[in-house]
Amino acid sequence: MGKTGGKGLSLARRLYTSRTLGLVLGLLCVGAAMYPLDPPVWVWVLMLFNGLLWPHLAFQWARRARVPYHAEHRNLLIDAFLGGFWVAAMHFNPLPSATTVSMMAMNNVAIGGLRFLLVGAAAQLLGVGVGLVVFAPAFVPATTPSQLYACLPLLMLYPLALGWICFRQAYTLGRHKRELLALSRTDSLTGLLNHGAWKDQLEIQFQRCKREQKGAAIALIDIDHFKAINDTYGHVAGDIVLRQLSKMLKQNLRAGDVAGRYGGDEFCVILPELPLFNAAQSMEALRERFSALGYEQSPALKVSLSIGLAVLDASHGDATLWLNDADLALYEAKSTGRNRVICCSAGKPRREVLGSV
């Protein structure tokens, strides 16, 4: 089933509840207005059919239709037509007629906005015209107290039900929007931020640190010889390695640290308010733990990390210069033997000797 079919079924299910409640309450309202007019039996039968059976028939009609969305719009026009018909049948009794017309107008606006309000109004006018042909044109100028009380449940309960349905729909759409936004910012394999989202966070952290005059460090992490891992052990093993590193980053970083997948086998981490020595300790511990991991699927597989680390420098005019320092440090780590942490301080990469800073 295509998108239109799914959308139509969703619309039909939502309207099934509101239509069932609205027409049962409407039956009470219209019945109270029709009773003093002593209509023939067929009118009562039609009234009962419209109030009690039509909601279920309309739902099944839409559910079994080839295009449920179009079928449900047809059902709504039938609702509007019958509403206009009952307005004429009630001889335009003020309160029941106004209640019927306004509740249907509210429903049409909620479903299709101004356009469907106008289409529904045209269907109601057609229903009024047919009603005037069937019933002698007449006007009941006053609404009795019993008819007033019969209209109150429809006036009170139906807007509440329709409002609740609209709220649930808006809530669901909002949740889906948030989920889609999260998916658009998340790497599907690792669950970390993707390249673009991490770069956005880098700019945010850079501006915050400059504004608040706080330090920070960023790390670029590369899995050594990752292409050889894929070629030797297969891409499934390569994916496992990537997920293991992302899992380790999630478990071992602080709550305020920001990790992402920069691309391919390269990862990135923002370490706010962390001095260079402490950042180097954290990355060295990560390197050692990751190197010690074993893989049940490939026992011979040994993996190491090269890490380039850069501290935020006051001379950095923008975040790209900060990132470039980390990239230089990573290049140094890879070109001098890999499986090591290289720190960049004042634009110069160097091997960080822990305990000497």
Image (cartoon, helix red, strand yellow):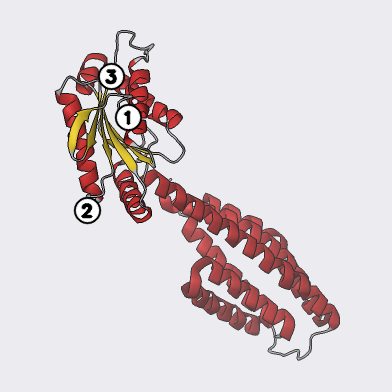
Amino acid at circle 2: Gly
In x, y percent, where is residue 201?
Answer: 34, 47
> Which badge, 1 or 2, is on the more N-terminal residue?
1
Q: Which residue is mark 1?
A: 280
Quadrant position of residue 311: top left
Relative to 242, is 44 above or below?
below
Marks 3 & 2, CB-CB < 8 Å contact: no
Camera-side residue: 200 or 108?
200
> Which badge, 1 or 3, is on the more N-terminal residue?
1
In x, y percent, where is residue 229?
Answer: 24, 18
> Could you say which disc has been placed on residue 317 in the image?
2
> Which badge, 3 or 2, is on the more N-terminal residue?
3
Task: Give the number of marks.
Answer: 3
In x, y percent, where is residue 255?
Answer: 46, 38
Left or right: 33, with 292 as reference point? right
Q: Residue at x 74, y 74 (%)?
A: 30
Camera-side residue: 261 or 184?
261
Relative to 182, is 242 above or below?
above
Separation of disc 3 and disc 2 at Cα?
33 Å
Q: Is residue 323 visible?
A: yes
Q: Residue at x 20, y 36 (%)?
A: 327
Separation of disc 1 and disc 2 at Cα?
24 Å
Q: Residue furthest left?
A: 335
Amino acid at circle 1: Ala
Left or right: 319, with 201 as reference point? left
Q: Residue furthest front?
A: 356
Amino acid at circle 3: Ser
Q: Which residue is mark 3?
A: 304
The local crowd at label 1, few if under 14, some if 14 to 19, many if 20 or more residues have their Cα within 10 Å, is many
Camera-side residue: 279 or 264?
279
Q: Secondary structure at mark 2?
A: loop
Camera-side residue: 342 or 221?
342
